Image (cartoon, rainbow, N blue to C red):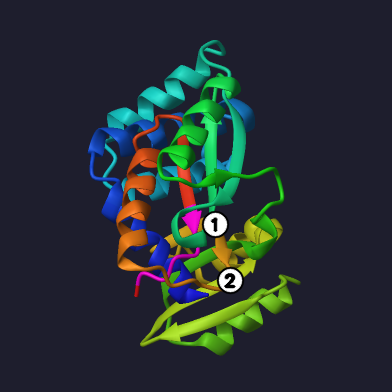
Amino acid sequence: MGRAYQNRKESMAKTSDMKAKVYSRYGREIYVSAKSGGLDPSANLALRSLIDRAKKDQVPGHVIDKAIEKAKGGGGEDYSPARYEGYGPGGCMALIECLTDNPNRTFGDVRMAFTKTKCKIGTQGTVSHMFDHVAIFVFAHADEDAVLEALMDADVDVSEIEDDNGTLTVFTPNTEYFKAKQALTEAFGELDFDVDEIQFVPQSYTTISSEDMEMFDKFMAMLNDLDDVQNVYHNVDLG
């Protein structure tokens, strides 16, 4: 699973080249999390994790504060999650997660990215069954057995643990996210997570031609230019 995560991060870094776009996405996600789950990060674990992740991605504090302040007002936009999927260039599989205040507009924009790159958007379930919806935690720790024991003691369903020279990557089902994070922090204190999020990880990869890769880069660039798109997951082997 680790390689899938690395591929996805490389792809996002390659196509998300505007800081303003990153700030906007975090701002929207923080706003939605605070509005739905409460303004206090100590009581809203999802919000706390989101803020920590935003800080690691060098999102300025005023962007974070503004999003929370906006949620405090109770008004503002009413965003809802939307997920689209289909086959991209070279027959690759793609999942696109959005937060939108206008589903018709968002669907039209995402569909345009598919059609402009000669691809086809699918219906719900077209490719999502070929991805695992997992929680991923990456942190420095010397004892893999101790980490596994702490998670097992807390009755966490651990899918996999990888050890890369003292950096552990823990995979659990997405539904175990909060339980797993609580178990880790209770056992080892406030860990400094390099990664602490829920993702879609492909079950297998596909290699596409150089010609298809050019179209794939265009496809990703078009999606990442859309304000409503939060995350794009795919199964292209970028290694």
Mark found first going from the N terminus, 1 or 2: 2
The image shows residue 82 at horizontal and vertical percentages of 61, 35
Front residue (pair 40, 55): 55
Q: Is residue 229 left or right of residue 17?
A: right
Q: Residue at x 37, y 48 (%)?
A: 220
Query: Element at badge 2?
Result: strand
Q: Position of residue 21 (x, y in %)?
A: 31, 35
Please, what is the three-letter code of the amino acid marked with disc 1? Gln
The residue located at (64%, 45%) in the rendering is 122
Q: Which residue is mark 1?
A: 199
Depth check: give the residue in front, 236 or 38. 236
The kind of residue tagged 2 is Phe
Alpha-carbon span between mark 1 and mark 2: 10 Å
Query: Does 16 lie within the magenta span?
Result: no
Residue 82 lies left or right of residue 114; in this view the side is right
Indicate the quadrant containing the C terminus: top left, top right, bottom left or bottom right.
Answer: bottom left
The front one of 48 and 188 is: 48
Answer left or right for 167 relative to 99. left
Magenta region's main secondary structure?
A: loop
- In magenta, the rendered stretch is 233-238
Provide residue 222's location: percent of width, then percent of height: 36, 39
Numbered circle sitting on residue 171 = 2
**Residue 65 falls in image quadrant:** top left
User: Extreme left residue here?
Assistant: 18
Q: Viewer-nearest of labels 1 and 2?
A: 1
